[in-house]
Amino acid sequence: MIFKFPTTIYFGKEHYTEVLEFIVHKRVLIITSKSGRRLHDPIIASLLRDAASQNTLLTISSEITENPTLLEVEAICARAKGERYDLLIAIGGSSVIDSAKAISYMLVSGRDLWSTIQLKKADELEEACIPLLVINSTAGTGSEINNCAVITNEKKKMALITDGIYPKCLWIVPEIMVGLPKIKAAYQYVDCLFHAIEGYLSRGGNTISDIFACECINLCCSQLMDFEYNYDTIHYKSKMALASIYSGLSDMYGGCLSIHSLGHAISGWNNWVEHGLSIAYLARSYYGKLQKMAEGEALQKIVALSRILSKQIGLNIDLKLVEILEVIFNKLDISSRLEEQLYKIEEIGALVVNARDSAGELFYNDPVLFTDNDLKEIFLESILRK
Ligand SMILES: [Fe+2]
């Protein structure tokens, strides 16, 4: 086993000075979302103003959308080529962070990003990638501390994975995470919790990933009961920002399951489907089938996970994992969105191929061996669930 953790984390706005010192006297490219909303946050605006006053050249690129595309990333790279930036700053959530990671790799390697991703040939570069500072605006991604960048192209969501793109520095400021709609907070919650659930059940799991998974699950569950009233408070964001780090570490050391491949297939196919929504959409069918097929140690782990979730959520009875997920989705108030049609029945065959092609490696982490027919049934049951 290899345990790497090269990112320096500053947690809290009191680390303003250290972060400012990291930025000043550099040529900086800032990557942010198309709305550029976070640039107007008082803490961010002050940081950039102070940096600019200390011999720092700031260029802002605000064009990243949800499920960022290859075209968006390539357009930024084309403009940045030859500018010799010595720092990238990602201000935003997972879409922005993933794009910034891909840009840092492309600007140094000069390689074609999509063929590198498809060939899974993101070898370590002789020259270091451009260092990346992440100012994470969403409490629940995991991308802020891992070496993975998911990019969408040709209806596929695929990951660039290479150690060169680990963020050098991460600044967590719960104050800048508030102000998102409740539905977005719910999807972030889903992604955060499910990385931990998957890391816990993964065949690649180990003691370290279990520790992070359980810490993440504990934090997520402790925030669930008051989600409706607290989801936009600094207290909630602070807890979930920590949960997100644990979630990312659980994923990094234990690995995700194939539900992430299936979810990526839905979002790659239909770019408007949020990542958290796609995972929640499939979860009950996926885990229902998983529990039916699991045997021995794998089944024991599912039962143990169900007990942990039941206890942490405060349920007094032992429920099946699928029933617990139902409780969680109700509390997050996303049940009605799970009844929408995110794809057509006739697209299911193509979605299975897409999932295997785009993130086939995750199937090796599954505690059971899913056939294509099993996957089709999961997609079908999810869409027929009303
Ligand atoms: Fe995820």
Image (cartoon, rainbow, N blue to C red):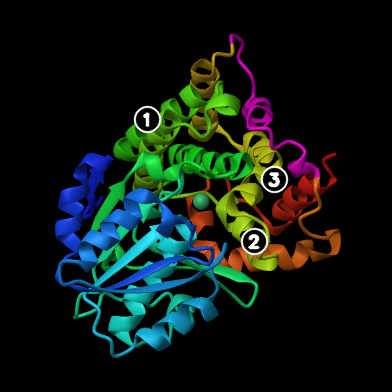
In the displayed structure image, the side of residue 354 where residue 239 appears, left or right: left
x and y, in percent, of residue 199 in the image: 44, 42
Up-down relation of residue 203 to residue 64 (above or below): above
Magenta-drawn segment:
316-339
First reached walking from the N terminus: tag 1 or tag 3: 1
Quadrant of the drawing holding the C terminus: top right
First reached walking from the N terminus: tag 1 or tag 2: 1
First reached walking from the N terminus: tag 2 or tag 3: 2
Q: Do the residues labelled 1 and 3 touch (CB within 8 Å)?
A: no
Tell me the tag on residue 267.
2
Tell me the tag on residue 281.
3
Q: Do the residues labelled 2 and 3 touch (CB within 8 Å)?
A: no
x and y, in percent, of residue 80 in the image: 35, 84
Amino acid type, callout 3: Tyr
**SS assignment at label 1:** helix
In the displayed structure image, the side of residue 203 where residue 380 appears, left or right: right
Of residue 177 and residue 322, the one placed in the foreground of this image is: 177
User: Is residue 128 at least partly visible in the picture?
Assistant: yes
